Image: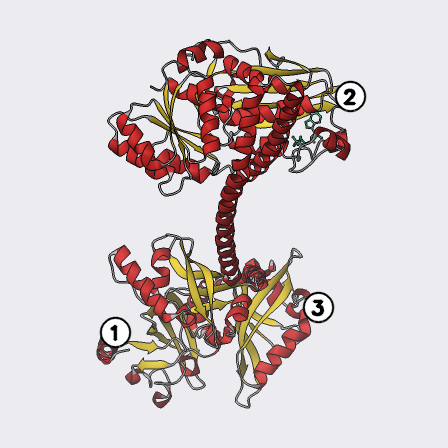
């Protein structure tokens, strides 16, 4: 109480006592008298020098009211009226008193109603007081008692509350019919109760205890009791007085709370690899789990109630983050707020932080800070959950390094492939070309046979090189899919026509429709298709069918389903040797062949189907097969395909050739004489006007002088390469010819570079009559 308040109280006290004959006391919650109207002390029979600073129950409220202190703990009301009967040896005074809790102190307003030392007063008044006293006692949330100190706890007085608490009436207890000690306290708790009370009495202290009673209905109930001994002048206990309340709900709640807390602690501590820290709203740590102890090397006792999480963070990092948050949130953020600014706003806050251990060593964590709220949604603290990510970061680092290494080795592989493909294919080019050309005009049977062997072997070698390069080069991410309108029926026939020569004596035809799986197509059906990649798949499947069918029938079925925007289905069926069941699962794996016998007989490196499945993946299709030994095999695949209007016409290849190559002027730029001669020979065969240039500068010169439809440009040339030559042709010519790259550098990178230079297509070496014809066909229509 402040000095001002104290003066005001004194004035009030004087006013009340002078004018109303009442008295007034201010008592602290622990029962100590702070102010008392000392002028009333004599009337009340009190010793004036034993009031201020002494406990209120020493003189003013002895006996029965002693157990009510300290009020702050056990009385949960701010107004507590009572009647006090006050007896001194030489004087009896009755007075009413009202107790109010005001601003943390107890105000006791007393009014002397009777000086009962004069025994002549009427009993009526006394009876009235007793009734009032009883009523008030009955209103208490429990029972008040006075009993003897014996094992029965013989009750001299019990308030009305006993009925609600025990089920027995006041009379049953006060008459001794029911013994508190025998009938109510359960057997297990009797000694404990007795001993606890005796011990408190021996020290002249109040006793507080919990024990169990059996109510009249047989229910077991836990009760709370607080009482004091009443001592005579010699210090002998004359009675016990106290207050008893039902503690069952409290005990149950406490035990539930204990279980919950235990569970929570177990969970927190079981997370030995996770830091879990809780703080109050000011940031002071309230929980520091075992994981936090283990990872940070601090003991919970060192942190709880003493530190904030700033102690485990790297200061520089906190400052940087605070600056970022200040800028982001538009208000100053610093210190502990740095961690909880988001959480306070109900936002999730997840960041990578550096934690500092007790010994100063550091480690990275993935930390989530969230606000802990009560049922009303108010923030009552914050929760830190952090995971040590040192290993994870290490793995990420390793992965990055591995990726970089893999990319470097991939680049090296690409370069190696480019060189190998050039070196291996360049000599094959003239071998194949010239054998092909010589065969066209060779009349001598023996020479022809030799030439055919040369051509076959060279092709075989070429295919094997191509298979290997192809397999390594196909990549879902890198391989470019070029969808062009393709008339399916014509396209399918062209595929058959191109492969017919390899049929190995088998019947070979196109069949419209794949039974019920994909009905027959309309012959004008035109879809967007990467015909080049599709041809590669078909070519692999068809050549396999030829290879593994000694004499029989190979069919290319084509069908169309309208589902999911359109599905194009191809089936390659044969009546060949079939594939044993135990090989069905491995057949698509690279370098897999069914039997070495067959391999030798049929040749191949076991890459055809592996290439097919890679290509199918690139084209987002699916593929499978059915096969039976001795009956044959059917390999099928389906591609998603968009149907487009318009057709490429149904002209036959021959008709198209006739239109195509008349008065078609072509410049062949090639430094290698053999290759130059070869290409010129092919072009002449298909009736084009041909001019040649052995190097870049000559090519540029020729283009200035003449108007060409197409320039076939070798890429690898000394001095000025094909790229630079193309650039200069485009820069210096009035009419821009279509430039087609001719190179053994079959890599994707080179293709992309050609496209970037403005070249319209790419013709891989070795050039054949067929490949030249196809590429020229596809560009003629562009002019
Ligand atoms: P290869 O280049 O050796 O033909 P593939 O990957 O194309 O490699 O085929 C792998 C193996 O699958 C072949 O060696 C063969 O044993 C078997 N195979 C593929 N197609 C057929 C088929 N139509 N009939 C029988 N066996 C086949």
Residue drawn at x 59%, y 24% as measured from the top left: 539
Q: Which mark is residue 318?
A: none
Front-most of 758 and 184?
758
Helix, strand or loop at label 2? It is: loop
Residue 675 horizontal/vertical position (percent) = 47, 31
Residue drawn at x 67%, y 57% as measured from the top left: 218
Callout in the foreground (3, 2): 2
Helix, strand or loop at label 3? It is: helix
Mark 1 residue's CB less than 8 Å from ligand 1: no
Callout in the foreground (1, 3): 3
Circle 2 is placed at which residue position? 630
Residue 517 horizontal/vertical position (percent) = 61, 16
Residue drawn at x 45%, y 33% as measured from the top left: 673
Total marks in image: 3
Callout in the foreground (1, 2): 2
Mark 3 residue's CB less than 8 Å from ligand 1: no
Helix, strand or loop at label 1? It is: helix
Tell me the quadrant of ligand 1: top right
Q: Is residue 149 visible?
A: no
Circle 3 is placed at which residue position? 187
Question: Given the current orientation, which residue lies at the most extreme front position?
Answer: 444
N-terminal-most mark, 1 or 3: 1
N-terminal-most mark, 1 or 2: 1
Give the position of the N terminus as an image quadrant: bottom left
Quarter of the rendering containing residue 743: top left
Other residues around mark 1 within 10 Å, as few (<14) / some (14–19) / many (≥20): few
Circle 1 is placed at which residue position? 20
Kindly check if marks 3 and 2 are in contact, taking CB atoms under 8 A apart as contact: no
Q: Is residue 716 above or below residue 514?
A: below
């Amino acid at each position: 109480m402040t000095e001002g308040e104290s003066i005001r109280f004194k004035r009030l006290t004087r006013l009340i006592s002078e004018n109303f004959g009442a008295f007034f006391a201010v008592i602290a919650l622990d029962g100590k008298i702070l102010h008392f109207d000392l002028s009333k002390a004599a009337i009340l029979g009190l010793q004036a020098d034993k009031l201020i600073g002494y406990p209120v129950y020493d003189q003013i409220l002895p006996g029965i009211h002693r157990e009510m202190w300290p009020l702050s703990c056990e009385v949960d009301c701010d107004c507590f009226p009572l009647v006090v009967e006050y007896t001194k040896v030489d004087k009896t005074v009755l007075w009413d008193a009202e107790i109010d809790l005001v601003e943390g102190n107890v105000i006791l307003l007393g009014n002397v109603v009777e000086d009962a030392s004069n025994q002549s007063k009427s009993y009526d008044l006394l009876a009235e007081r007793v009734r009032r006293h009883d009523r008030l006692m009955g209103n208490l949330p429990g029972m008040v008692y006075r009993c003897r100190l014996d094992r029965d706890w013989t009750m001299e007085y019990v308030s009305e509350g006993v009925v609600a608490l025990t089920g027995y009436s006041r009379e049953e207890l006060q008459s001794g019919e029911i013994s508190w000690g025998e009938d109510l306290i359960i057997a297990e708790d009797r000694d404990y109760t007795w001993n606890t009370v005796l011990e408190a009495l021996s020290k002249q202290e109040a006793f507080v205890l919990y024990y169990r009673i059996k109510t009249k209905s047989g229910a077991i109930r836990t009760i709370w009791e607080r009482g004091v001994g009443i001592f005579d002048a010699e210090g002998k206990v004359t009675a016990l007085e106290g207050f008893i309340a039902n503690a069952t709900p409290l005990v149950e709640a406490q035990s539930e709370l204990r279980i919950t807390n235990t569970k929570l602690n177990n969970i927190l501590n079981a997370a030995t690899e996770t830091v879990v820290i809780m703080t109050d709203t000011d940031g002071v740590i309230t929980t520091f789990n075992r994981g936090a102890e283990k990872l940070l090397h601090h003991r919970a006792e060192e942190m709880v109630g003493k530190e904030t999480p700033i102690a485990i963070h790297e200061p520089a990092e906190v400052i940087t983050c605070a600056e970022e948050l200040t800028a982001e949130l538009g208000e100053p953020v610093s210190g502990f707020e740095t961690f909880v600014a988001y959480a306070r706003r109900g936002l999730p806050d997840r960041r990578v932080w550096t934690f500092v251990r007790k010994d100063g060593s550091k480690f990275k964590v993935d930390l989530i800070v969230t606000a802990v709220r009560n049922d009303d949604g108010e923030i009552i603290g914050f929760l830190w959950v952090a995971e040590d990510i040192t290993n994870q970061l290490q793995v990420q680092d390793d992965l990055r390094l591995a990726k970089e290494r893999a990319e470097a080795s991939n680049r090296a592989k690409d370069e190696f492939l480019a060189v190998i493909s050039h070196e291996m294919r360049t000599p094959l080019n003239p071998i194949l070309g010239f054998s092909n050309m010589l065969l066209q005009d060779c009349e001598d049977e023996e020479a022809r046979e030799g030439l055919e062997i040369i051509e076959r072997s060279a092709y075989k070698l070429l295919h094997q090189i191509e298979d290997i390069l192809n397999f390594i080069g196909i990549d879902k991410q890198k391989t470019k899919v070029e969808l062009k309108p393709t008339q399916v029926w014509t396209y399918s026939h062209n595929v058959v026509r191109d492969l017919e020569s390899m049929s190995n004596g088998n019947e070979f035809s196109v069949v419209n429709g794949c039974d019920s799986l994909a009905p027959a197509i309309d012959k004008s059906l035109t879809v967007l298709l990467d015909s080049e990649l599709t041809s590669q798949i078909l070519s692999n499947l068809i050549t396999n069918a030829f290879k593994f069918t000694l004499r029989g029938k190979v069919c290319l079925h084509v069908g169309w389903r309208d589902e999911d925007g359109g599905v194009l289905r191809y089936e390659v069926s044969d009546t060949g040797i079939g594939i044993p069941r135990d090989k069905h699962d491995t057949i698509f794996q690279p370098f897999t062949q069914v039997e070495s016998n067959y391999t030798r007989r049929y040749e191949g490196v076991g890459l055809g189907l592996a290439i097919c499945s890679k290509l199918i993946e690139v084209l987002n299709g699916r593929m499978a097969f059915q096969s039976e030994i001795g009956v044959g095999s059917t390999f099928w695949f389906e591609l998603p395909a968009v149907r487009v209007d318009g057709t490429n016409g149904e002209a036959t290849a021959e008709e198209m050739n006739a239109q195509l190559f008349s008065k078609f002027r072509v410049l062949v730029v090639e430094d290698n004489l053999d290759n130059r001669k070869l290409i010129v020979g092919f072009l002449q065969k298909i009736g084009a006007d041909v001019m040649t240039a052995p190097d870049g500068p000559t090519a540029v010169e020729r283009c200035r002088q003449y108007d060409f439809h197409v320039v076939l440009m070798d890429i690898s040339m000394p001095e000025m390469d094909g790229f630079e030559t193309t650039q200069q042709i485009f820069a210096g010519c009035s009419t821009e010819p279509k430039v087609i790259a001719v190179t053994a550098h079959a890599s994707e990178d080179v293709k992309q570079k050609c496209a970037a230079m403005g070249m319209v297509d790419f013709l891989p070496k070795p050039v054949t009559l067929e490949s030249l014809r196809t590429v020229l066909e596809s560009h003629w229509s562009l002019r």
